[in-house]
Amino acid sequence: MKPKEILVFGASGQIGRHLIRKFTKNNYKVIAVTRNIHQKGYILKTQANPGYLEIEELRLFDDNKLKDLISNCSVCINLIGILYEKKENQFKNIHTEFPKLLSKLSNELKIQQLIHVSSLGIDNANDSQYASTKIEGEKAVKKNFNKSVILKPSIVYSVDDNFTTNLMTLLNRLPIMPIYYEGKTKFTPIHVTDFAEIIFEIVKKKITGQTIECVGPEEISFKEIINKLLKSIGKKRPLISIPLPIAKISAKLFQIMPKPLLTCDQLNLLKYNNVISGINKTNFDLGLIATKKFETEIEKYSYNWREGGQFSKKKFSTIE
Ligand SMILES: NC(=O)c1ccc[n+]([C@@H]2O[C@H](COP(=O)([O-])OP(=O)(O)OC[C@H]3O[C@@H](n4cnc5c(N)ncnc54)[C@H](OP(=O)(O)O)[C@@H]3O)[C@@H](O)[C@H]2O)c1
């Protein structure tokens, strides 16, 4: 059977690597796009059997190369996103201008589907650049290509994420844990394999022209997330609620770091609940059920942060 070609931008990230495995195992051919084949090649090459994966290097706004890539695929998936800005990596370029160009070319080259991954909980976050540029990106994609599917996931977590793993490292090292907005902000975390399954089904069922909010089976507050992580790594830490003016000063200091733990923009975003809006359809409405529960899944990799690390007595398999 001739494999169908799926073009994935941002393929080396957490979601991208899981998607490559899901598609190639199911007989699709994936073309993974990265900015730097030398840096990311090693991690990409190991995600699929030979013959099922090609790797392409691209500078984002290279129109000719983009046209070449898009014209060789039937489905294009955009996973490129950033959490903070650096000199050359600006929210507007990554979250608005690139999706705008990608959707314009997808329309011109008449591909079957464009799946653009945006975020949940950003629609009212006018004081966050991350959020407003993502919203502008969604609008451009919808306007330019009516076969686009926009996915808005809540936190996507796994052993490969930057969220639970960083939090567990902090909980291990800090004597106290600072929490913002009293830890009341609500999330609907979705496990990366559930999210990859949703994307796979959207391609398989040839769903087009929809905006879908992608959530896991539970609504959990930030404080509950921290408590579940603490329980899972077998640690106790006092949770200290930080008043907003002090939180703002600490975010200003943190954002100077090369890989900031928190930026002012993220602090602003953190006050908005990350739950379904009631405006768009959800994965559950489409019968794409996410089943994995947060506490059960983090138990499978949290032993790395428990007393004894990899030799911890409480150990679970991480193999999916
Ligand atoms: N993870 C979550 O909890 C979550 C929640 C909501 C929405 N999302 C969205 O889902 C998408 C994928 O998330 P993820 O967690 O897989 O992200 P990730 O692990 O950070 O990976 C994103 C990928 O984007 C590429 N990238 C980063 N900066 C780039 C730039 N300046 N130019 C071109 N490519 C760049 C990188 O690929 P190369 O280095 O190989 O070029 C990277 O592997 C993002 O749009 C994100 O905003 C994620």
Image (cartoon, rainbow, N blue to C red):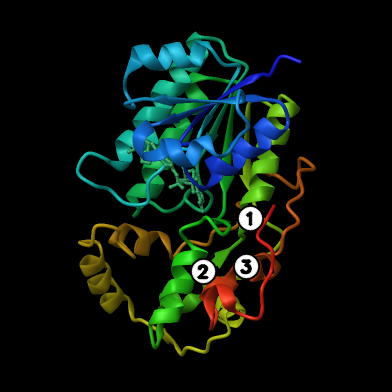
Q: Secondary structure at mark 1?
A: strand
Q: Secondary structure at mark 3?
A: helix
Task: Tell me what residue is drawn at x 43 percent, y 35 percent.
Answer: 41
285 relative position to 270: left or right: right
**Which residue is under mark 2?**
185
Question: What's the CA distance linking mark 1 and mark 3?
Answer: 12 Å
Q: Which mark is residue 124?
A: none
Q: Secondary structure at mark 2?
A: loop
First of labels 2, 1 by sequence position:
2
Q: How many marks?
A: 3
Q: Which of pointers 2 and 1 indicates the residue nearer the eye? A: 1
First of labels 3, 2 by sequence position:
2
Label 1 packing within 10 angstroms: few (<14), some (14-19), many (20+): many
Can residue 279 be seen here? The reply is no
**Which residue is under mark 1?**
190
**Which residue is under mark 3?**
298
Residue at the right extreme, as displayed: 287
First of labels 1, 3 by sequence position:
1
Can residue 24 be seen here? The reply is yes
Question: What's the CA distance linking mark 2 and mark 1?
Answer: 16 Å
76 relative position to 299: left or right: left
